[in-house]
DNA sequence: CATGGGATTGACT
DNA sequence: GTCAATCCCATGC
């Protein structure tokens, strides 16, 4: 997707990314779950302002923001909105399409539904790490491309974000309703 | 310079 | 359902 796609309100981009394709190192998958984060709300890393950690979030749209979660996992985001605004879409789950054998080898698992059904799982499956922080998503090595025809009008459900303790009321999580590869069901009661 | 807290996952009761 | 693993970095002394 071109930078202009990302230079819009982050919640719109989060919804529109459902059905798009993420690819890296011969592996790819359909985005089936996303969450929006914006520097105006405290769940966003950029809420603290411009620091070494958040510099990527305030940079140009269409680049990758990759951070380490709980000291163990890497999580992939697409930076959104104009430079100077700290906003990004967290890619939370994929339906695997290409490179299934490589994904299974990296994950040490067989079941399709277990390969990319979580933000830490999909980065491990695709071989995405902190070294990709700041990379241009339109040039690679990590790329996001437009939706296959079958995903053009896929139904999208909105619900509250997962795993956070602040600003939990915002309905900024988006899921492909029919997908079996979500990190949790489309509508979580919590 | 020391400390505390995660945008998670997988193993275990 | 509960819980530990593990490390970067923002914050406060």
Image (tube, coloured by chain):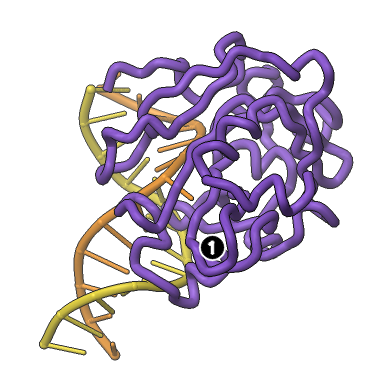
Chain colours: A purple, B orange, C yellow
Q: Nearest the camera: A77 or B5?
A: A77
Q: Which residue extends farthest top?
A: A178
Q: Nearest the camera: A183 or A170?
A: A170
Q: Nearest the camera: A6 or A136?
A: A6
> For the C terminus of chain A, which image quadrant?
top left
Q: Going 70% across and 38% down the picture, which residue do you hit?
A: A125
- The reply, left or right, for residue A123 in relation to residue A47 is right
> What is the x, y in percent for residue A17?
65, 34
Q: Quadrant of residue A152?
A: top right
Chain hosting mark 1: A
Q: Quadrant of residue A21?
A: top right
- The reply, left or right, for residue A10 in relation to residue A154 is left
Q: Which residue is mark 1?
A: A57
Q: Going 45% across and 47% down the picture, which residue do you hit?
A: A37
- The reply, left or right, for residue C5 in relation to residue A58 is left
* Image: A153 above or below A106: above
* Image: A24 above or below A28: below
- Work out whether residue A104 can be spotted: no
Q: Going 44% across and 74% down the picture, which residue do you hit?
A: A50
> For the N terminus of chain A, which image quadrant?
top right
> What is the x, y in percent for residue A156?
56, 18
Query: Crowdedness of circle 1 by 10 Å Cα count: few (<14), some, many (20+)?
Result: many
Q: Secondary structure at mark 1?
A: loop
């Amino acid at each position: 997707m071109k930078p202009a796609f990302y230079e819009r309100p982050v919640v719109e981009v989060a919804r529109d990314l459902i059905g798009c394709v993420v690819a890296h190192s011969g592996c790819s998958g359909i985005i089936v779950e996303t969450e929006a984060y914006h520097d105006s709300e405290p769940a966003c890393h950029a809420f603290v302002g411009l620091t070494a950690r958040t510099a990527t979030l305030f940079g140009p749209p269409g680049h990758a923001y990759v951070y380490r979660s709980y000291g163990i996992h890497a999580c992939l985001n697409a930076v959104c909105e104009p430079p100077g605004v700290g906003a990004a879409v967290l890619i939370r789950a994929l339906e695997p399409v290409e490179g299934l054998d490589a994904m299974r080898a990296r994950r040490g698992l067989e079941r399709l539904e277990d390969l990319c059904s979580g933000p830490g799982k999909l980065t491990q499956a695709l071989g995405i790490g902190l070294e990709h922080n700041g990379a241009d998503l339109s040039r690679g090595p990590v790329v996001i491309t437009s939706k296959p025809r079958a995903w053009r009008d896929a139904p999208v459900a909105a619900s509250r974000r997962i795993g956070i303790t602040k600003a939990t009321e915002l309905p900024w999580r988006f899921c492909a309703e029919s997908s079996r590869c979500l990190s949790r069901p489309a509508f979580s009661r919590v």
